Each structure stands twice: as C-alpha cells, then as structure tokens.
Amino acid sequence: MNRFIVQDKNRGERLDKFLVQRFPEYSRSHLQKNIKKGCVTVNGKNENSPRYALKTGDRVEASIKPLETINLEPDKTLPLNIIYEDDNLLVINKPAGMVVHAGAGRPKSNLVNALIAYYPQIKKVGDEPNIRPGIVHRLDKDASGLMVVAKNNRTFQYLKNLFKKRRVQKIYLALAWGKFKEKKGIINWPLAQNPKNPRKMVVIQNKKNILNSKAQSALTEFEVLKQFDNTAYIQVYLRTGRRHQIRVHFKSIGHPLVNDQLYGYRKQKFLGSSRLFLHATKLGFISIMGKKLSFISRLPDDLQKILTKQK
C-alpha cells in the first residue's frame, strides 16, 4: 500500500494524472483501471473516478495491481488481411470470430499474435504492450471489418489522440430487428459495465442510477438504409468507441442487432450463419504524415446472403 498527502501544488489535479507521476512504471490507462476497480482510496473512502479533482491535504492510498502477464507468441497460421500499410501503421480487415487482443487462456487465438508474427517490433508499441501491442481501438470479436494498428509509439499516441478528439470517421453496417419510426436518429446514452454480468454493458438513462459515476458518455448516430418487414438495414456512425456500444444502444431503443447472442431477444430467431450482423465498413482519418486516408470494406458474403433474403 502506497500513501500520499496531496500538496497545494497538486490541488485540482485529476487523480489518474496524480498517480501517473507516482507510478511511472505503469501507463495511465492501467492506473485508471485500478481506480475503477477500487484499488485507490481518498481520505479512507474508495474513489472510482479517475477524474476526481484532488484537494490540498487529501490522503491518497493506492494498491496498484501489477500488469497481467500474457504470453505473446507469434502465430503465422492466423489470417491477417492487410489492406494498407506504410512505415507507421497497418489497416486490416478483421474477420468475425477473431479476438483482437490477448487474454488469460488465449495465448494464440487473437489478432495480436498474428500481428507479432508479421511485424515483431510491434511488441513494444502502445500503453499496454504486454497485452495489446499496437491496438488503438476496439472491434468486437463477433464483428468484422476495418481496424487501424500503430507500428510505433509516436503513431500510437497520434492515433489515440485522433480517436479521443473524434477525428476518425467510423461507419458500420448493421441489420437490426423491428420497424423504425424515423429514418435517422441519435442515441446518446452513457454506458457502464453490468454489475450482474461483467461480460455485458448497460445504458444509464437515469441520473440517479448508482452506476452513473462509473458510466462513460456514448454517442451513436444512424440512418436506416432499407426497412424490411421484420428487420432494418442500417448505417451507423460511431462518434465514441465504448465497449459493445452499437449493440447496447440499439437494444436500448428496442431494436437489437440480428444474431446478437449477448444482447438479442431472449427467444430470438437466428438468420443465416448465425453470426452477429455488424461490419465496420469505412474508416477515415488524417495520417501522422498529413495524408488523408480513407478505406472501405464491403459487406462479407455471409452477411450479404442474410441481407438478400430480407423482404
């Protein structure tokens, strides 16, 4: 247990920034996770918000958990569909079913292992290179489509900042259940981890909800491209990148995605290949070299077959 007394010079400073200075061996994101998990107290009480503004005289106690050790082995057998590459980054087309980064018990079944086999230097890139080297943003295991990966730390920080400032264009294609009343819409509900099931996220629609302090803002815009009898083909503009954001947001408005085994209807009907109908179809941004990059990935054949059968 490490103990600190906040001095006047640190008054008003965010708790996570304060800890970064005291634990330089850990990334800010790792320290934020520890704060949210209750590993830090302020004046004897758990403080779960990395944004907490410190006051002079605050007593901060932190018991930071060490970084998880993952065996990052290269695996040349895994598919790695690279559609663009330069000295600083890769743009890949991830297949559905592939886990993005390593986790306990999954040493050779994820995108990271394929990346290491292709470009070994990536093992030193990112805030948490021991777990997800080069990975800048999320894409669910069950979703397919475009992702950008950083090949060096300078590019990683640049891309991370672009995502934070919402300067990356991310467009998805999805098929959702039900009939939409409006052709266009915005879903602006914050998200938090479901305390009853850590695998799931929940929307926070009430400011008095006890999870409100742990929630993160989430903004999803959408346009119905084609309304069918029982489903709707949708183009989704992702303005933030929260875990399971699209899936949870559409469930919250009564239109869960087709073949969503985690957030779908309890007795839902599965269509086609039974895999989640969600595809990251477009990715656009300005590169660190000032070049405008824009990529498109067409709808995979298995999803196109499902779409063709809609009436």
Image (tube, rainbow, N blue to C red):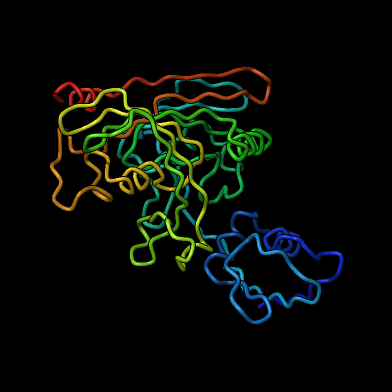
Residue visible at 41% across and 45% down?
A: 245
Q: Nearest the camera: 210 or 214? A: 210
Quarter the C terminus occupies? top left
Does residue 301 appear left or right of residue 187 in this picture?
left
Does residue 138 appear left or right of residue 141 in this picture?
right
Picture coordinates of residue 51, whole percent (x, y): 65, 59
Q: Nearest the camera: 37 or 246? A: 246
Residue visible at 35% across and 48% down?
A: 248
Picture coordinates of residue 219, whole percent (x, y): 48, 41
Tell me if residue 230 comes above or below residue 226 in the rendering: below
**Can you tell which quarter of the image residue 229 is in?**
top left
**Can you tell which quarter of the image residue 206 is in?**
bottom left
Residue ranking furthest to the right: 9
Does residue 283 appear left or right of residue 95 in this picture?
right
**Can you tell which quarter of the image residue 95 is in?**
top left
Residue visible at 59% across and 57% down?
A: 30
Residue ranking furthest to the bottom: 44
Picture coordinates of residue 254, whole percent (x, y): 27, 46
Picture coordinates of residue 143, whole percent (x, y): 34, 37
Residue visible at 18% across and 38% down?
A: 274
Q: How many marks?
A: 0
Quarter the N terminus occupies? bottom right
